[in-house]
Image (tube, rainbow, N blue to C red):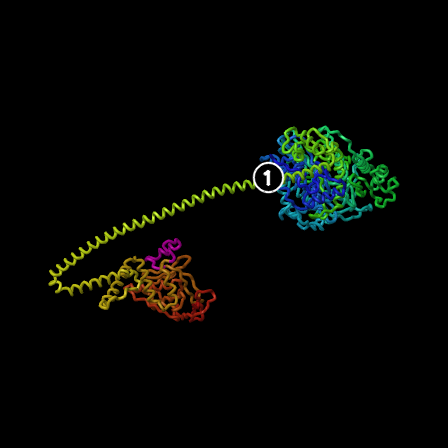
């Protein structure tokens, strides 16, 4: 059986104010303080939840908490907003009763957060599924959108709702959400144009400038600097704890989830930007001939950008700010606007544009979240609206807000009394009339159609002639002077004539929450909420997608000469519809209270909380609840909780629960006038009676706890003893087993030792016998061998003595040579390996050296036998290069590791050189790119150098045209330097046919290979002389008729690490070679 807890268990202070004893304002505040200090921010007044704003996050909204309060009785757990949300949801789902949750409190008390918590709880406990989750997500994501456009930072709250919101959430028969409808009330649109010091405009302006991308701001013609916009207050533009950029991204995401198209989002942002631009339009006076001043726009840049955003002709809007057209029947009259009127028109347009945009947003959200099914829906309404407001300077907005709260208080009292009366009738308890303050008289003072303040304000706004706030106050003083809740210094009531706390331009109303002083200045203008027809028509002409929806009255084809309804009339009608809606639903109340004005945690200001308790009417609520019976509880719960107080009901009552409660109360000697029996509940009149029962229950629980402890300790001791006894038997059994196993192991071990000794003794005897037999056999064999040896030696002694010495010598020499040759097998076959075994004996000295020489020649021959002809030729060339250049030319060591390729140009494969290849008849032995040195300047020209067996050819690099072809017999010698350069001179024989043009001075990266091949061709040719190689740092070169000296010096050339040739004079070329 589940053990249920109760509101009364582990209670800090009093969880339900109905049970507070004694009941007065001081004890009420002290109980709130006590619970607030222990992080208990929720307290009940019957079914009403009081919520204190903790100004910090508390771990009481986790998914575990949601499950804890799910499907639990309202009073079963400690007070929590989840308990009220669960009670409302279960009543809607199971009893088919439409519900409404009324959340009230002043700004900063946590109303918006409370509404979010209610909606999040309902979303968590209702059904699941793709469509259901989509609806829940859309309902929840509508909050960030409305908060961005309808909330602002105020002195009392960093996220204050500046509009009233009522949301009807529609459910199907299973309790799954289908959709919702949102209604908004009285957006504080005056905030668009002007904010009090220390407060901000609506969040969306700051979020757009902070979070939009640079590209978006460029399209909207905006700048991130707040100071550039007159409608944005600068002293509190940045708020600690608010990340406007992140909030903007959240709003964009929420609009996408709710169902806004990207074009619609862009249109909304364009209107927000237009409002900012509108605030920057300024006017200057311009005198006319008739003596009147006419307003003109100072700087038309902001006007131009705003018109571009809205798609309006600049001249049309500029004229609407300078002229006003008045129509009366069939006549039209145009008047000029002075600067003050132009500023009024500008601000009126800004306020109307923003408020209508907000209304369009609400309508658009409703289109997305409305229920699609046409069947009847169950409805849960959530009302988040301003609380009662009493400021130092109260104006028309506070008057309208307080009127709404008067109506809410009226319906609260009526519904609370009705709920009490219905429960008394349902439980068959006699109903006693409850005395309470009925604020209907205050509501009548404000909303009476004949003499009400709102009716007189509308009448004053509509009458012809001069209408001012003072004329309105005069009318109030005339008509409402005798009303007991109306006070004015200028009224006929003489008792207020000397009241200096009541200024002449003010009137005071005694609301249910206290007296409020209203300054009459601005009442008429704010009630009129007038927008000049010229501006409406100008807006209607805009090409922007939303403007015609926002300003339908600007349609020239549907001109309505009637004045639009006033703000007061519209709000009164909205409140009337709201009250009718609330009266059809079962009410649930959340009263929000803020503990301090500093918006910080852990501070509780008694005076501020007391002020809120008064104007929320919480004491009145407790008194109404306690007027009859203060506490009521189902019989089952009562009997379950207090059955231990009576021996007859403990531990289990077998009969009907009501009979058990009667027996229980009779046994506890509770006076009969302190309780009454209903059909399903027991009603207790005085909280003291309940607390007496609680005290007796607590004492009884202590006795029961002692008894339970005693029985538990006895059971635990007996269990422990039996466990020890059982353990002792087990331990003894295991020990006996262990002892027997040890004894057995010892006997077994001893037996094995004895067996091993016996087997060892037997084995030794057998071994001794076998050894004896073996020795006997060996002795016989040895004696026989000796005997046979003696016989043989006697027979062959005469032969042995003649040849023994020579045979022993030959055998010894043979063994030594055999061992020596076997030692030579370890020598490797590599010609590079010079290792050779050491000479073991002196008589082998000559043979040792000759064998080493023969072996080396043999392995070299074997190594050479592996070479191909091509590889052999390469090695021969390398050998010849070594003979020519080793220790003579500094370039030689770097060429040793580089193979001689010969054809570096791939002349056979490259199609570029097909023509050149055809001009050469013989096989090309070497093809390379060289530089031909010019005598005139020492610079080189690239040439193709081809070498065959009979001649060498120089050709142009680009065209492949042959520049010179020299037979090798005409080549006398080749001159090179000793350094690391690539210069060489090909000297021709004097008198030869090729010598007419002179010698060739060339430069190549493959100098070693070129000269080696030239020398090799000269060596192998039988019909010509060998080519001489001259290696010197100075040599002469014949250029046509002149001889030039080429001199090589070491130095750092300017062009890098390569050698450079430079002409010094007509007879000298100097080659600078880098130092090694």
Residue 771 percent across, percent down from the top left:
23, 53
Can residue 899 be seen at all in this image of the molecule?
A: yes
Q: Is residue 602 shown left or right of residue 863?
A: right
Identified at 69% across, 38% down, the residue is: 696
- Picture mark count: 1
Q: Is residue 123 shown left or right of residue 759?
A: right
Residue 634 percent across, percent down from the top left:
68, 32
Magenta span of residues: 904-926
Can residue 531 be seen at all in this image of the molecule?
A: no
Q: Is residue 916 magenta-colored?
A: yes
**Closer to us: 192 or 769:** 769
- Identify residue for label 1: 711
Residue 55 percent across, percent down from the top left:
68, 46
Residue 80 percent across, percent down from the top left:
67, 39
Q: Quadrant of the C terminus?
A: bottom left
Q: Name the secondary structure under disc 1.
A: helix
Q: Quadrant of residue 114?
A: top right
**Up-down: is 974 above or below 349?**
below
């Amino acid at each position: 059986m589940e053990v249920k807890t109760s509101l009364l268990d582990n209670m800090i202070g009093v969880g339900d104010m109905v049970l507070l004893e004694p009941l007065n304002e001081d004890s009420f505040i002290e109980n709130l303080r006590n619970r607030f200090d222990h992080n208990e921010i929720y307290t009940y007044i019957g079914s009403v939840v009081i919520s204190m704003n903790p100004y910090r996050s508390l771990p009481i909204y986790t998914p575990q908490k949601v499950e804890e309060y799910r499907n639990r009785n309202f009073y079963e757990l400690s007070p929590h907003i989840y308990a009220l949300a669960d009670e409302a949801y279960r009543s809607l789902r199971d009893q088919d009763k439409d519900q409404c949750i009324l959340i009230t409190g002043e700004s900063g008390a946590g109303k918006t957060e409370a509404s979010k918590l209610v909606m999040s709880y309902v979303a968590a406990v209702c059904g699941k599924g793709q469509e259901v989750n989509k609806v829940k997500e859309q309902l929840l994501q509508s909050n960030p959108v409305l908060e961005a456009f309808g909330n602002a930072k105020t002195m009392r709250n960093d996220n204050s709702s500046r509009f009233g919101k009522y949301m009807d959430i529609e459910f199907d028969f299973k309790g799954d959400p289908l959709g919702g409808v949102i209604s908004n009330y009285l957006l504080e649109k005056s905030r668009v144009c002007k904010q009090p010091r220390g407060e901000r405009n609506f969040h969306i302006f700051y979020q757009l400038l902070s979070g939009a991308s640079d590209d978006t701001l460029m399209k909207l013609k905006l700048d991130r600097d707040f100071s550039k916009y007159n409608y944005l207050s600068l002293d509190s533009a940045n708020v600690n704890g608010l990340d406007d950029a992140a909030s903007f991204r959240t709003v964009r995401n929420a609009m996408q989830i709710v169902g806004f198209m990207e074009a619609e989002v862009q249109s909304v942002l364009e209107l927000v930007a237009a409002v900012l631009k509108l605030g920057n339009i300024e006017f200057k006076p311009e005198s006319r001939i008739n003596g009147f001043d006419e307003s003109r726009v100072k700087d038309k840049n902001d006007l131009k950008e705003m018109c571009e955003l809205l798609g309006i002709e600049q001249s049309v809007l500029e004229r609407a700010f300078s002229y006003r057209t008045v129509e009366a029947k069939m006549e039209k009259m145009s008047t000029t606007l002075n600067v003050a009127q132009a500023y009024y028109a500008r601000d009126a347009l800004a306020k109307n544009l923003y408020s209508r945009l907000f209304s369009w947003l609400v309508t658009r959200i409703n289109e997305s979240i409305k229920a699609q099914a046409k069947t009847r829906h169950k409805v849960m309404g959530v009302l988040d609206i301003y609380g009662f407001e009493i400021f130092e300077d109260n104006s028309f907005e506070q008057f309208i807000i307080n009127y709404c709260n008067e109506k809410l208080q009226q319906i609260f009292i009526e519904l609370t009394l009705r709920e009490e009366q219905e429960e008394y009738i349902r439980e068959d308890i006699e109903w006693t009339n409850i005395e309470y303050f009925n604020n209907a008289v205050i509501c009548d003072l404000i909303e009476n159609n004949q003499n009400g303040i709102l009716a007189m304000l509308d009448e004053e706004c509509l009458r012809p002639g001069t209408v001012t706030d003072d004329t309105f106050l005069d009318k109030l003083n005339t008509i409402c002077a005798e009303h007991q809740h109306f006070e004015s210094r200028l009224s006929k009531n003489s008792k207020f004539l000397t009241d200096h706390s009541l200024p002449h331009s003010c009137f005071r109303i005694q609301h249910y929450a206290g007296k409020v002083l209203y300054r009459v200045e601005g009442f008429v203008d704010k009630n009129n909420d007038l927008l000049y027809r010229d501006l409406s028509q100008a807006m209607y002409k805009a090409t922007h997608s939303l403007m015609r929806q926002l300003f339908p009255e600007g349609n020239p084809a549907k001109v309505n000469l009637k004045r639009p309804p006033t703000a007061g009339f519209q709000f009164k009608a909205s409140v009337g519809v709201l009250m009718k809606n609330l009266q059809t639903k079962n009410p649930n109340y959340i009263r929000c209270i803020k503990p301090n004005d500093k918006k910080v945690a852990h501070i509780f200001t008694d005076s501020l909380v007391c002020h809120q308790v008064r104007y929320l009417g919480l004491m009145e609520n407790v008194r109404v609840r306690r007027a009859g019976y203060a506490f009521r509880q189902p019989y089952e719960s009562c009997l379950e909780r207090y059955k231990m107080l009576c021996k007859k009901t403990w531990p289990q009552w077998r009969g009907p629960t009501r009979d058990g409660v009667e027996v229980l109360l009779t046994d506890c000697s509770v006076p009969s006038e302190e309780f009454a029996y209903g059909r399903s509940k027991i009603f207790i009149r005085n909280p003291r009676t309940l607390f007496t029962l609680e005290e007796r229950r607590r004492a009884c629980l202590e006795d029961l706890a002692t008894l339970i402890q005693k029985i538990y300790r006895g059971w635990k001791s007996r269990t422990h003893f039996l466990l020890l006894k059982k353990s002792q038997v087990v331990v003894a059994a295991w020990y006996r087993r262990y002892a027997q196993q040890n004894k057995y192991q010892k006997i077994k071990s001893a037996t094995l030792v004895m067996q091993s000794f016996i087997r060892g003794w037997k084995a030794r005897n057998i071994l001794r016998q076998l050894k004896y037999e073996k020795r006997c056999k060996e002795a016989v064999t040895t004696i026989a061998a000796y005997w046979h040896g003696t016989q043989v030696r006697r027979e062959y002694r005469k032969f042995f003595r003649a040849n023994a010495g020579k045979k022993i010598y030959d055998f010894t020499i043979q063994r030594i040579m055999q061992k020596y040759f076997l030692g030579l097998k370890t020598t490797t076959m590599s010609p590079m390996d010079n290792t050779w075994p050491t000479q073991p004996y002196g008589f082998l000295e000559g043979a040792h050296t000759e064998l080493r020489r023969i072996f080396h020649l043999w392995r070299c021959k074997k190594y050479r036998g592996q070479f191909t002809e091509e590889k052999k030729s390469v090695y021969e060339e390398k050998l010849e290069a070594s003979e020519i250049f080793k220790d003579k030319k500094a370039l030689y060591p770097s060429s040793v590791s580089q193979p001689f390729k010969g054809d570096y140009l791939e002349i056979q494969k490259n199609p570029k050189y097909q023509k050149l290849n055809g001009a050469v008849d013989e096989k090309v032995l070497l093809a390379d790119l060289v530089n031909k040195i010019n005598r005139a300047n020492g610079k080189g020209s690239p040439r193709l150098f081809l070498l065959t067996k009979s001649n060498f050819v120089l050709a142009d690099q680009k065209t492949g045209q042959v520049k010179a072809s020299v037979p090798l017999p005409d080549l006398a010698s080749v001159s090179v330097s000793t350094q690391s350069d690539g210069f060489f001179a090909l000297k021709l024989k004097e008198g030869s046919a090729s010598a007419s043009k002179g010698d060739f001075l060339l430069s190549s990266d493959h100098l070693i290979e070129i000269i080696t091949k030239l020398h090799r061709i000269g060596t192998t040719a039988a019909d010509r002389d060998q080519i001489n190689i001259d290696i010197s740092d100075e040599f002469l070169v014949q250029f046509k008729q002149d001889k030039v000296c080429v001199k090589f010096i070491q130095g750092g050339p300017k062009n890098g690490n390569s050698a450079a040739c430079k002409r010094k004079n007509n007879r000298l070329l100097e080659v600078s070679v880098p130092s090694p």
